[in-house]
Amino acid sequence: MSSFFWNMFQSGQIDQNAIKSSHNSVRTNSNSQDLTYLQDRLDTLSLANQAMWELLSEQLGLSEADLLKRMEHIDLRDGVKDGKITKPVIQKCPECGHQSKTHRACCYWCGASLSSTSPFAG
Ligand SMILES: [Zn+2]
């Protein structure tokens, strides 16, 4: 009789593992699609970046040393040389000068709009 319950338990475990495996397969497929999308976006952005650089270099006579110097300058704006542009957490209100977190749409102190007009704001 105990082997009957043991077999039922084992059968239940196998069914649960099959369901988990199915869910993991769906999740893996979704992650793979996300990765393909991001790779395509990166390829397009790299191509646009290369084209912009070549235009600037040809038309303004800028060198790669100029480019690398500016990249380092921008990288260091947050005080950390890590090869990344780190979005600031705090911004200064253009109306009252108080500091607010960058995710806020309006200033906590005066209610002024904090939405950026920069094309690079995320
Ligand atoms: Zn304000």
Image (cartoon, rainbow, N blue to C red):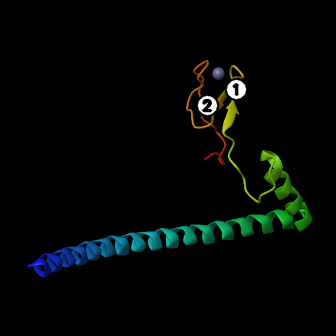
Which quarter of the image is occupied by the N terminus? bottom left
Q: Quadrant of residue 108?
A: top right
Disc 1 element: loop
Q: Is mark 1 within 8 Å of ligand 1?
A: yes
Vertical side of 5 occupied by 105: above or below: above
Image point (40%, 74%), residue name: 29
Residue 24 point in image, percent of width and height: 37, 72
Q: CA distance from mark 1 to mark 2?
A: 8 Å
Image point (85%, 66%), residue name: 57
- Which amino acid does the dot numbered 2 rest on? Leu
Q: Please name the residue that numbered disc 1 is placed on.
A: 94
Residue 76 point in image, percent of width and height: 82, 50
Q: Please name the residue that numbered disc 2 is placed on.
A: 114
Disc 2 element: loop
- Judged from the image, the quadrant occupied by ligand 1 is top right
Q: Is mark 2 within 8 Å of ligand 1?
A: yes
- Would you call the spot at circle 1 few (<14 residues within 10 Å), some (14-19), or many (20 or more)? few
Vertical side of 14 occupied by 67: above or below: above
Residue 94 point in image, percent of width and height: 70, 26
Towards the viewer: 60 or 92: 92
Image point (57%, 72%), residue name: 39
> Circles 1 and 2: CB distance less than 8 Å?
yes
